[in-house]
Structures are given as structure tokens and as C-alpha cells.
Image: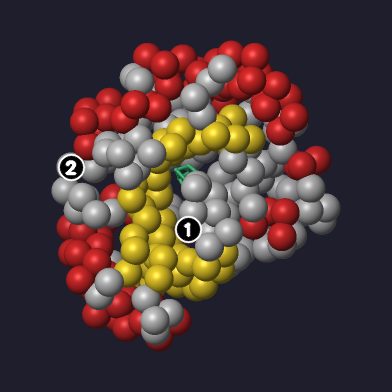
Amino acid sequence: MQITEIYKSLQGESSYAGLPCVFVRLTGCNLRCSWCDSEYTFTGGKRMTLEDVLAEVKRISPNGGLVEITGGEPMLQEREVVPLMQALLENKFQLLLETSGERSLEKVPAEVVKIVDVKCPDSGERDTFRIENLAALTSRDEVKFVISSRADYEFSRDFTEQHDLAGRVNNVLFSPAFRKDATGARDSSHCLVDPQQLAEWMLADNVPARLGLQLHKFIWDPAVKGV
Ligand code: SF4
């Protein structure tokens, strides 16, 4: 499979935020979100076999723990990434998969926690979530909305209600988008929607979702990669 990087950091998002995690970042994405901070994954990377990836993960984290498979869009390499998930599970790693849900999630092993980033209108990739994937979501999974505007917030609120997401998954996450050229200050000044504003909208509407901030962008300079 084509891999951009494998590294250890703190998980920055989801209900696993703050935990040490090994990130396996696959190369390539078929979407072009307006605020994407991972454009360096679109090309390049290096070919690695399943055995190479497993060995590297074990070298970085010899005592097991949390691994996230991310990208880019990892499900573009389904034929190779699904056996990798099985191998990591057999080796007792706890596994997260970050995906846009544009590709089928049917073959993802049930033990994997799927974190599905449903694209909002201002991402420029609205309606790319494959609606059949709702059937593949379980009570261990999470659905995330990255929000840049009031229109994105209303889309997320309505999608959550329409598809009873709170009843389907472990967590629904509303997260302010960061400007992709953010650098310097490690605070919410780079968010495209003020977190306070988003919190007030969520409270006013009683949205059954959790406000998520990208923790790593408050710990390290938002421009730093590999964290
Ligand atoms: S799906 Fe992810 S990697 Fe692809 S363009 Fe959107 S934010 Fe970037």
C-alpha cells in the first residue's frame, strides 16, 4: 500500500482525544475539502507491504495501544488496508479508522471504530457521504462534522436529526474548521467558526452532539505536520 507517514502523537480528535496513538497515514484522496490540512498526502508516499507497516507500528508502539488509520482517504486502498486492519487487530491493537465515508465501509472489520467525517456544504464536498454507509455504523463508531459557517452548522444539526445519528453511534462530533494556512498562535483565533459561537448554537438547539476541538492544534503550532 502507499503510505505517507507512520508516527506516534496524541490523538487530537474524537472521544479518544488526548490518548497516545500511532497514526498510519495513507497516501491519496479523491476529495478536495476547502480547509484540508493534509494536502501533502495527495501524492508521493512510499510503497510498503502489510508486513512492513505492521513491523513499523510494533517498533513505535511495542506494547500495543491505539492505532489510527487515516489519510488522505484510506478506503481508496481497501484491498490492502482491510487485511492490514485484520492484522493489527490480531496483534491486539485498538483500531480507529478516519474516513470521509465516500467509499463503502461494508468490509471494515466490526471491531474497528469508524470515525466518519461527513462533509458539510462549505467544504466544497457536500453530498459525498455514501448514504448506504449509515447501515454500516455501529454503537462503537463516531460521526464528525467539520463546521465553517452557520450553514454548515444547520446542515450538521439537520443531518444528525434526520438520520438519528445519536441513536446509531457512540458520539456525534461538531468541530470548528481550522484555516488551512493557520500558523503561530495556538488558540481558537484560527477557527473558521468561533467555538463559543458554535457552542451557543448547539445549546440553543439541544443538539445531541459533542463539541470537539482539534487538540493537537492547541498543543503544537497548527502548521506542524506529523503531530
Ligand atoms: S477528505 Fe480529508 S484528506 Fe481528503 S481533501 Fe478532505 S480533509 Fe483532505
Quadrant in which the C terminus is drawn: bottom right
Respond yes or no on whether mark 2 lies under 8 Å from ligand 1. Answer: no
x, y percent for residue 179: 69, 41
Q: Residue at x 29, y 50 (%)?
A: 75
Is residue 31 visible in the rendered structure shown here? yes
Pick whichever of labels 2 and 1 is earlier in the sequence: 1
Q: Are marks 2 and 1 in contact (CB under 8 Å)?
A: no
x, y percent for residue 207: 53, 20
Residue 109 left/right relative to 68: left
Q: Residue at x 56, y 17 (%)?
A: 206
| Residue that mark 2 sits on | 106
| Residue that mark 1 sits on | 41
Please name the colour scheme applied to the rendered image.
Answer: secondary structure
x, y percent for residue 57: 38, 77
Respond yes or no on whether mark 1 lies under 8 Å from ligand 1. Answer: yes
* 218, above or below 125, in the image: below
Of residue 146 and residue 166, the one placed in the foreground of this image is 166
* 144, above or below 112, in the image: above
Quadrant hosting residue 91: bottom left
Of residue 73 and residue 198, the one placed in the foreground of this image is 198
Q: Residue at x 19, y 53 (%)?
A: 109
Residue 110 left/right relative to 101: left
Whole-number angstrom distance, CA of label 2 to CA of label 1: 24 Å
Residue 162 left/right relative to 211: left
Q: Residue at x 50, y 47 (%)?
A: 14
